[in-house]
Image (spheres, helix red, strand yellow):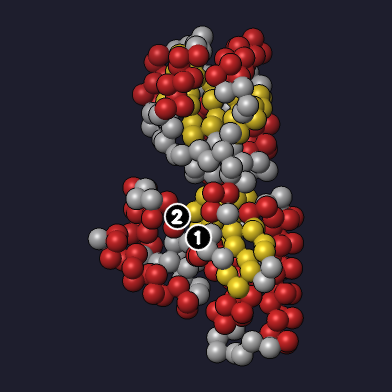
């Protein structure tokens, strides 16, 4: 679990740090006394929960929460303050909880039970957007660059299969419609696989892949995906699909799934 704490008062920052560590000793906890440093960290690293002081000099906690939500809408925000009058403003931001200083273990435990977005302890920080056009993100709003369009489509199909193992011959058939599987096609698919692995390796997420002899799959527990959340009946994911009405619209092989999602969303 990746957690950040942001508070410009050093004594308060260390106190919150100690309390969180006493509740979740094995978490990856980073503390910042400057909001801009927290934004820089979040733009490069996956964050599950952000404990934010509301009253700070450079940037208040509400502004900081908006910045973090733009980087990753799935970040759970927990506001921390000594001033009860800030509560109405803080709840204008989709926050998991609002806790008062001094922060107690009971307050942290309560906040963990009220998280708006589920935390996957195996998460790599990788996020796949399947509704609309398919895109993949890592810790920011900028999509991961795949050097070949077919390598991106290959990853999209693996995401679509949700952990199902795909043989090399199956991948060739899907990505190169109606072409026979031969040595030339095998070389092409191997080139696509190498390009896909490089794109994931460059952002530190290659371990999302499960590679066995003559087959590929992904570990669905290591990726945040709107399609997966839809299948798990997540309300926000269902609303997102209803808004777009599209599933991987850049790939023809996804058309049948679009029909199934239409029925499930109504």
Q: Secondary structure at mark 2?
A: helix
In the figure, 2 relative to 111: above or below?
Answer: below
Q: Nearer the viewer, residue 77 or 128?
A: 128
Q: Which mark is residue 266?
A: none
- In the picture, the quarter occupied by the C terminus is bottom left
Front residue of 182 and 12: 182
Left or right of 207, for residue 162: left
Name the residue at 40% across, 67% down: 246
Left or right for 229, reference 25: left
Real-space Cα distance between discs 1 and 2?
A: 8 Å
Image location of residue 80, percent across then percent down: 49, 19
The residue that appears at 61% across and 19% down in the rendered structure is 21
Direction left: furthest residue: 266
Instruction: Report the quarter where the N terminus lies.
Output: top right
Above or below, 71 relative to 149: above
Q: From the top left corner, tell me how far across and down residue 44 is, in percent.
A: 68, 43
Mark 1 or mark 2: which comes first in sequence? 1
Cβ–Cβ under 8 Å for marks 1 and 2: yes
Establish if 246 lies above or below 108. below
Number of residues whose C-alpha sits closer than 10 Å to that of mark 1, classed few (under 14), some (14–19) or many (20 or more) = some
Q: Which label was assigned to residue 162?
A: 1
Q: Nearer the viewer, mark 1 or mark 2?
A: 1
Residue at position x 68%, y 37% from top?
40
- Helix or strand or loop: what does disc 1 sit on? loop
Going by the picture, which residue comes out furthest to the front? 213
Q: Nearer the viewer, residue 199 or 260?
A: 260
Percent of width and height locating residue 119: 50, 38
For the question of whether residue 8 can be seen, the reply is yes
Residue at horizontal 64 percent and vertical 9 percent from the top: 11
Q: Kindly identify which numbered label has been placed on residue 228.
A: 2
Instruction: Answer left or right for 22 relative to 148.
Output: left
Q: Position of residue 209 (x, y in %)?
A: 64, 58
């Amino acid at each position: 679990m990746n957690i950040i704490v942001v508070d410009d008062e050093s004594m308060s920052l260390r106190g919150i740090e100690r309390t969180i560590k006493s509740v979740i000793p094995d978490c990856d906890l980073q503390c910042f006394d400057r909001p801009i440093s927290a934004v820089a960290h979040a733009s490069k690293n996956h964050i599950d929960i952000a404990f934010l002081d509301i009253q700070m000099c450079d940037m208040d906690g509400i502004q900081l929460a908006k910045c973090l939500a733009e980087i990753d809408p799935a970040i759970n925000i927990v506001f921390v303050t000594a001033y009860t009058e800030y509560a109405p403003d803080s709840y204008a931001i989709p926050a998991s909880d609002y806790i008062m200083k001094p922060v107690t273990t009971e307050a942290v435990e309560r906040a963990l039970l009220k998280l708006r977005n589920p935390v996957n302890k195996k998460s790599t920080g990788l996020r796949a957007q399947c509704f609309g056009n398919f895109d993949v993100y890592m810790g920011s709003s900028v999509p991961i660059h795949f050097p070949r369009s077919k390598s991106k489509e290959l990853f999209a199909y693996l995401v679509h299969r949700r952990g199902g193992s795909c043989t090399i011959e199956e991948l060739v058939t899907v990505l190169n419609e109606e072409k026979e599987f031969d040595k030339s096609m095998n070389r092409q698919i191997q080139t696509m696989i190498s390009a896909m692995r490089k794109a994931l390796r460059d952002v530190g997420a290659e371990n999302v892949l499960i590679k066995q002899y003559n087959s590929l799959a992904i570990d669905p527990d290591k990726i945040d995906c709107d399609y997966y959340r839809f299948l798990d009946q997540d309300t926000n994911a269902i609303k997102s699909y209803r808004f777009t009405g599209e599933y991987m619209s850049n790939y023809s092989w996804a058309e049948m799934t679009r029909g199934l999602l239409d029925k499930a969303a109504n």
